[in-house]
């Protein structure tokens, strides 16, 4: 079956809009790269601020309406009028699925139309579970919100891969220095590299722990398009489900000219949302992504759109069959999920993970997790690459949320960008003066490894780098008997627990790279009064 | 001669011709030799420029001090020939504001850039292997923007471009050094004068830590490794920025109370002498500072800077 498609300007416009949305999304992400003295732009979070799912879930979980997210209500208004055009035209993650589906169409053309399946109700179940869990304070947007997934994946997996490839290529060309007579290839590559390094790259040679897993989840979600086009959007996406609820009776509706439909089913082949039954009947506005492909592919030209102010469904139209028991089941699943996620002692505040060093300004863990979406904007914007996605350190509830890993980076004393950039204020926006007072952990010296203690030599690299103006690491001079029985004075480092803010630079620069001889744990973090070992 | 990757053939030819000419004409030693059999007047080995310490370092004072110190040595033409590629190596170790004296003063750096350009340098590069994040340190220290405005190329050092080189030192037999710096015709070493916890002071010699990788192992024997790397770098021109000095809690600082304004810039060809002078500014006896003593042992210069051909200049 070959499809005759009239290239209609409106679908071309849609594709252009989708490509522009992806370009803007990635552009804003790369714009977050280079650290500068200026405050991070508020535009960095644009795609989050227009995401009503984050607004609602955070509102329920944190019991606070985030003013920055109010623009997302405009998306709901648009949905009420035009249906799920957000999904079909604007959502960057949706656009990625559309592009992959488009490629799949060209590689493996479909023979049968995709028709409405009851499994598409799953996304509403996901949505209700998510909302019910949020009522109990669990916000599990990390693996479920499309903007969050796409941002995190791009920031921690796709872009680092692209950056690494570019860096390797530049290094290879610089090393081998290929030339054609007088002309050198480096004359081309070096200026480009300099410009990219100055304007795009956040941290050279950046990589993220578990970036491979994040990338694999993304690749899986995208590959499912080969089986069912826009699998994620049809079956899973809770944002799509939320918008579907608002598209119950959109003013703009599909219209089929009376008696003109030959029930050839061709419209179903290119339908992004699988919104109809077989034979083009039973159009469901909640499932229609407004892609308008049906206008283009109908061989009789009998499909159109009409504006119906009263929103009265046509005889051929249907509604999704969302039953009370679906919602009840979803609600129970959400409550059960929230309970299970909270079973661990750590989630109940009875234990503190030493490796869970949160960025400065992060709220108390419960409140933090109620807001943090795991979008990875803070990880992208951290100039030292210290902020890394968790895997298990914060439990399954807190998967892919930020933690500071001193071995990979440190919290720069003169930087407060993560808090300034955090879209949901899970990390509070502190002034630089306030941030310098916040303790995120405490450094402890491991005397069995520290060179002046264990190996009788000078070192002091940690003390040298300590950024606290009065130095949180101080030195004690000790007379030590050496192997040849001579006496030598050695200076040994000690941590002042009152001064140390836990920034982690000492651990980062310790000559021991495998297990540093000075290590920072979350002990003493300002946000948790129960995690304070020292008398103030 | 340097190998600059951006040189076109035309530039190359012009440069080759002008280099020959410049070598014959602009080098004062060559000039005096050519003008007659009389022995050339000895050139100063060190110059100290001072201005009244007014409590702050203004941009124009920092700039005039640098100009005077270089002029006191006989001008930048003495070190820079037409077409040279110059690397200016300030201390940009830390993400700190200029007034905290953790990094070299930006106006000292930008003035040196201008002097090198005026002396005919083909290109002037400015860069350091920073301790904190390079981009933030370059920007917050003011050195990046100032050097750029003065016409320098601000270079970020790439971790994967350090090359193991034969150092031939006592501790360091071979060590990764940044090739782009070594390949320059001239490296101007321009540290800030400050306190350092491990070495008591950090001055010109220690500033060479910023051209090598894997330096955190140096701390187990800093004075020897620093002397090794200094000898390897063959210092020709050092400029010690003491416009304001950090007297305690170095090398990072952070307390404005630890900063002392001196409005002094010293320049010289003897790195040990300059460091000895810096020790005095910080209130130490040079002979008691192990890096300076080791430098003298290595024959890199003289501790008694007053025994040198010294010019002291007082600015109004």
Image (cartoon, coloured by chain):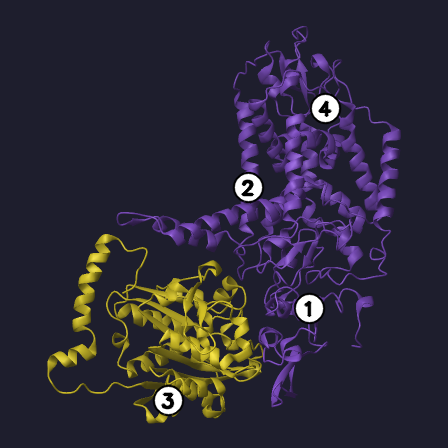
Chain colours: A purple, B yellow
Mark 4, residue position: A285
Label at residue A24: 2
N-terminal of the pair, mark 1 or mark 2, is 2
Q: Chain of mark 1?
A: A
Residue at image mark 3? B302
Badge 4 element: loop
Label 3 CA crowd tier, 10 Å (few <14, some 14–19, many 20+): many
Query: Do pointers 4 and 2 mark residues of a single chain?
Result: yes
How many numbered circles does the render carry?
A: 4
Report x, y in % for residue B114: 32, 70
Badge number at residue A144: none
Discs 3, 4 touching: Cβ within 8 Å = no
- Alpha carbon separation for disc pair 2 and 3: 61 Å
Is there a contact, CB below 8 Å, between mark 4 and mark 2? no
Q: Where in the figure is residue A66, as x and y percent of width and height?
A: 72, 50
Residue where numbered disc 1 is placed: A519
Work out whether residue B126 or residue A310 is closer to the camera in this orientation and state it.
Answer: B126
Label 1 and label 2: CA atoms lie apart by 40 Å
Q: Residue at x 80, y 67 (%)?
A: A531
Q: Which residue is found at the position 56% from the left and 13% from the top?
A: A2
Q: Are marks 1 and 2 in contact (CB under 8 Å)?
A: no
């Amino acid at each position: 079956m070959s499809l005759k498609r009239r290239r209609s300007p409106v679908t071309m416009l849609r594709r252009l809009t989708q490509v522009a949305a992806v370009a803007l999304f990635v552009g804003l992400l790369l714009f977050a790269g280079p650290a500068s003295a200026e405050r991070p732009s508020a535009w960095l979070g644009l795609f989050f601020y227009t995401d009503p799912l984050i607004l609602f879930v955070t509102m329920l979980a944190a019991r606070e309406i985030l003013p920055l997210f109010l623009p997302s209500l405009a998306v709901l208004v648009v949905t009420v009028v035009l249906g799920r055009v957000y999904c079909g035209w604007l959502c960057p993650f949706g656009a990625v699925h559309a592009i992959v589906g488009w490629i799949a169409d060209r590689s493996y053309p479909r023979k049968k139309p995709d028709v409405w399946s009851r499994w598409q109700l799953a996304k509403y179940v996901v949505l209700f579970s998510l909302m019910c869990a949020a009522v109990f304070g669990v916000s599990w947007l990390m693996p479920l919100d499309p903007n969050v997934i796409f941002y995190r994946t791009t920031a921690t997996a796709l872009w680092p891969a692209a950056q690494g490839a570019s860096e390797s290529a530049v290094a290879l060309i610089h090393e081998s220095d290929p030339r054609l007579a007088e002309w050198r290839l480096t004359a081309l590559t070096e200026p480009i590299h300099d410009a990219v390094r100055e304007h795009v790259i956040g941290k050279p040679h950046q990589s993220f722990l578990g970036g491979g897993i994040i990338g694999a989840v993304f690749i899986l979600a995208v590959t499912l398009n080969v089986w069912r086009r826009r699998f994620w959007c049809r079956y899973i996406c809770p944002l799509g489900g939320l918008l579907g609820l608002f598209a119950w009776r959109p003013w703009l509706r599909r219209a089929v000219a009376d008696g003109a439909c030959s029930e050839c089913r061709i419209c179903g082949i290119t339908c992004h949302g699988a919104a109809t039954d077989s034979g083009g009947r039973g159009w469901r506005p909640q499932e229609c992504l407004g892609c308008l492909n049906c206008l283009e592919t109908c061989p009789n030209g009998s499909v159109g759109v009409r504006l119906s102010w009263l929103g009265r469904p046509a005889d051929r139209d249907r509604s999704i069959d969302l039953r009370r028991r679906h919602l009840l089941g979803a609600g129970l699943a959400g409550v059960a999920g929230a309970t299970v996620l909270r079973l661990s002692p750590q989630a109940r505040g009875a234990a503190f993970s030493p490796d869970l060093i949160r960025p400065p300004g992060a709220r108390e863990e419960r409140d933090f997790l109620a807001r943090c979406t795991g979008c990875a904007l803070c990880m992208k914007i951290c100039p030292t690459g210290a902020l890394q996605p968790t895997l298990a350190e914060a439990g399954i509830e807190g998967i892919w949320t930020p933690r500071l890993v001193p071995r990979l980076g440190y919290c720069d004393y003169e930087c407060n960008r993560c808090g300034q950039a955090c879209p949901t204020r899970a990390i509070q926006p502190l002034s630089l003066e306030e941030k310098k007072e916040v303790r995120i952990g405490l450094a402890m010296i491991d005397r069995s490894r520290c060179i002046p203690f264990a190996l009788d030599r000078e070192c002091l690299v940690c003390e040298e780098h300590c950024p606290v103006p009065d130095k949180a690491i101080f030195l004690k001079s000790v007379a030590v008997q050496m192997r040849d029985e001579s006496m030598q004075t050695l200076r040994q480092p000690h941590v002042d627990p009152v001064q140390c803010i836990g920034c982690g630079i000492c651990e980062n620069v310790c000559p021991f790279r495998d297990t540093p001889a000075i290590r920072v744990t979350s002990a003493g973090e300002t946000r948790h009064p129960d995690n304070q070992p020292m008398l103030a | 001669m340097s190998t600059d990757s951006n040189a076109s053939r035309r530039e190359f030819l012009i440069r080759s011709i002008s280099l020959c000419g410049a070598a014959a004409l602009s080098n004062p030693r060559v000039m005096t030799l050519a003008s007659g059999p009389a022995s050339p007047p000895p050139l100063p080995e060190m110059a100290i420029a001072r201005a009244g310490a007014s409590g702050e370092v203004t941009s124009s004072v920092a700039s005039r001090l640098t100009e005077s110190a270089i002029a006191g040595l006989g001008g930048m033409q003495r070190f820079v020939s037409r077409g040279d590629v110059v690397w200016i190596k300030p201390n940009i170790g830390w993400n700190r504001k200029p007034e905290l004296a953790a990094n070299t003063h930006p106006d000292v750096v930008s003035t040196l850039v201008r002097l090198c350009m005026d002396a005919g340098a083909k290109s002037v590069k400015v860069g350091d292997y920073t301790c904190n994040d390079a981009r933030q340190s370059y920007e917050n220290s003011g050195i990046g923007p100032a050097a750029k405005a003065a016409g320098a190329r601000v270079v970020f050092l790439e971790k994967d471009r350090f090359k193991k080189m034969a150092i031939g030192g006592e501790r360091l037999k071979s060590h990764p050094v940044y090739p782009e710096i070594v390949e320059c015709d001239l490296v101007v070493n321009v540290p800030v004068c400050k306190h350092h916890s491990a070495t008591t002071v950090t001055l010109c010699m220690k500033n060479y830590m910023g051209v090598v990788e894997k330096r955190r192992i140096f701390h187990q024997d800093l004075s020897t490794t620093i002397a090794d790397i200094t000898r390897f770098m063959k210092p020709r021109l050092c400029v010690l920025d003491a416009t304001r000095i950090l007297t305690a809690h170095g090398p990072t600082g952070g307390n404005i109370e630890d900063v002392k304004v001196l409005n002094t810039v010293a320049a010289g060809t003897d790195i040990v002498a300059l460091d000895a002078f810096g020790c005095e500014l910080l209130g130490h006896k040079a002979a008691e500072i192990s890096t300076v003593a080791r430098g003298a042992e290595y024959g890199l210069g003289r501790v008694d800077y007053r025994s040198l051909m010294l010019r002291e200049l007082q600015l109004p």
